[in-house]
Amino acid sequence: MNYKLRREKLLEMLPEYSITVMYSGVAPYSIGDEKYPFKVDRSFYYFTGIERENLYLVLIKLSAAKSSEMLFIEPFDEKMAKWVGGKIKEDEAREISSIEDIRYVQSLQDDIFYYIHRLGQANSFTLCGNLDKEEISQKNVVSQLFTDFVKADPSLKVKNIFKEIFILRSQKDQEEIEVIRKAISVTKEGIETMMANSRENIYENELEAYFDFTLKCKQCDHAFTTICATGKNATILHYSQNNQYAKSNDLVLCDLGAAYQLYSSDITRTFPVNGRFTERQKQIYDIVLRANKLVRQMAKPGLTLAQLNNAVIDFYQKELSAIGLLDNGKSVRDYYWHGVSHMLGLETHDISISGYPLTKGCVITNEPGLYLEQEGIGIRIEDDLLITDDGCEELSSDIIKEIDDIEEFMNRYK
């Protein structure tokens, strides 16, 4: 990945006399001295390639022709390295990020104040950050840092550059696309292993374990907590207990994904635990599958995610009415209450701006579903789409989803 090029693109978008700060984050404590697994701030990683705690990226832009970049790291501690592993060293940080100016976090504030007050442009700097909200949030480390600067010098301005970062991160380059393809291919293998080992009276978490084993063998992490829901559980959108057993004729809804080099896949497949759909299951599954294909046909630059979702609702309005599900005052929202799509990339629900039109290079999900709680039927079919010049490419097209294909595959193993 060309992290230096990414920083150069961001600098082009930023105002003159601005200081941009990004923070890698820290893992919170779980209990005692035990921490949760560290998850790097994805924007920090996007611009540096470094997945370590408590680091700062600082970009200084004085003019279109004059800018600089610095990376602030923690000092290497030989004693702590024996217990928990060493902090990143200067040479390693420089090699990964291509940033030459490596400094230590202890000098961060003094160094920033130097640029604000010692370069002949006092009180004209704009502090830029990928902030959670337009206003300064006390919960955000960078926001708190900015708060301290503004208290010291109220004339300083603060700019949220969430939009600029979104524009860059949403348009995937070829390297990013290939990494996502890899994550999808591992997810495919995991789903097929689940299908091959599915049977009546298997526990959801036992079925889930086949997916977990595949990820471990392929050096991948989970993109998110796996949903492996059988029967009525599949009508709960974010079901995560995964501890019930599958009864005869249950459907299994598995919403899952591999993360490879931090890039996520996000796939949902629904299949019969015993390898055979009932006629009612086929009827509902066919409607969801046709909604999935409708989105794939529609997705292209210029459309918004809301437009894709509205098309699904209109389609369901006609189809559900035709089979009597909208009788007695029922509406589409009684059976479908989530959106059909979200951005995908370094985060499963990648950063997005509501109403922003799709552009070439965006990767989005396509996940229509229908949930009939009274009948114990929950069906969702989710694929990952790459927006191209005039349409889209279904990156997950190799993962079977046709009824006949699913039944034929599963019954090889019965």
Image: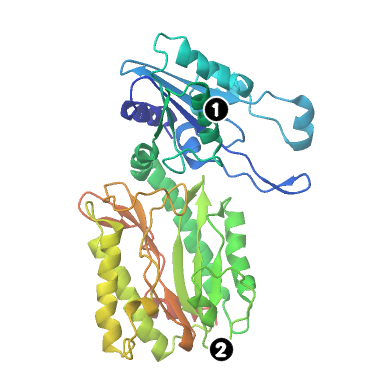
Query: Is 216 drawn above or below residue 160 in the view shown?
Result: below
Residue lying at 60% horizontally and 55% vertically, measured from the top left: 217
Q: Is residue 205 left or right of residue 285?
A: right
User: What number of labels is visible?
Assistant: 2
Q: Which mark is residue 117?
A: none
Residue lying at 56% horizontally and 88% vertically, measured from the top left: 248
Q: Quadrant of the C terminus?
A: bottom right
Query: Is 194 drawn above or below residue 251 in the view shown?
Result: above
Residue that label 2 marks: 248
Residue 110 percent coordinates (x, y): 57, 17
Q: Is residue 393 left or right of residue 224?
A: left
Residue 141 percent coordinates (x, y): 56, 36
Q: Nearer the viewer, residue 178 or 32?
A: 32
Q: Is residue 331 left or right of residue 77?
A: left
Residue 402 percent coordinates (x, y): 36, 75
Residue 38 image-quadrant placement: top right
Q: Is residue 332 left or right of residue 234?
A: left
Going from N to C along the chain, the mark reached first, 2 or 1, is 1
What is the secondary structure assignment of the residue under circle 1? helix
Residue type at mark 2 is Ser
In whole angstroms, how far apart are the C-alphas of marks 2 and 1?
A: 62 Å
Residue 141 visible, this angle: yes
Q: Nearer the viewer, residue 124 or 188?
A: 124
Residue 304 image-quadrant placement: bottom left
Residue that label 1 marks: 148
Residue 335 visible, this angle: no
Residue 68 image-quadrant placement: top left
